[in-house]
Amino acid sequence: MKKFEGMTDEALALLYVKGNNSAFDELLSRTQSKLFTYIMFVVHDHDVADDIFQETFVKVITKLQHGQYTDSGKFQFWIMRIAHNAIMDWYRQQQSRHIIEPNPDNDLQNISSSLVLDSFRESELVNEQVLIDVKRIMEALPAPQREVVYMRFYQQLSFKEIAELTGVSINTSLGRMRYALLNMRRMAKEHQIELALQA
């Protein structure tokens, strides 16, 4: 809407808290496409994504009305965190997928995060074909791995931001990325796809 042009998402959220429903409509129109794309990418089912999207916005409304949002300048980050939690709740309810997490036998916990970060720093996909191949392979990853790859490469988030957003440690985020890359390389080899990553 023209009357909200130039207003930040944070200002709109606070305006909605004060009773301006049009401000929320504007927030919804600004965020729905990005948020739905993120949810759909993780769950791979349009109906499920739609349900989680609706649930996310119900939670957003509830939290806003109960004063559980403060203007931190990170409204998009806040709403993505709510969506992430809704996705994880849905996966827990399904119990149909085993979520791979680092375990006590996993030596990734003993690797310093700076060593792992160095191996991923400045890694970029070299060309469009590689991006298409990578996306195809990503579809086959377990949800937590797919999510961290999406956040890192498509949303350009740092591992610290990914850890905050998903509610896990940086080492867990790094571990998921490492597993994802190992799985993607394995799948690429099995399907004879060249994945050229820039070091």
Image (spheres, helix red, strand yellow):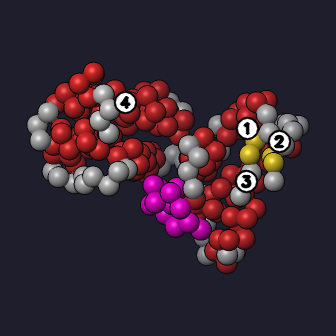
Label 2 is placed on what type of residue? Leu
Label 3 is placed on what type of residue? Glu
**Residue 74 placement, left or right of 144:** left
Check disc 2 and report its element: helix, strand or loop: loop
Q: Which residue is mark 3?
A: 122
Check disc 3 and report its element: helix, strand or loop: loop
Closer mark to the observer between disc 3 and disc 2: 3
Q: Say if mark 3 contacts mark 1, CB within 8 Å.
A: no
Q: Earlier in the sequence, mark 4 or mark 1?
A: 4
Question: On the image, which quarter does residue 13 sit in?
Answer: top left
Q: Which residue is mark 4?
A: 30
Question: How far is mark 3 from mark 1, CA to CA?
Answer: 17 Å
Residue 28: x, y in percent?
31, 30
Q: Which mark is residue 195?
A: 2
Residue farthest along the left direction in this orientation: 19
Residue 159: x, y in percent?
58, 59
Question: On the image, which quarter does residue 7 sit in?
Answer: top left
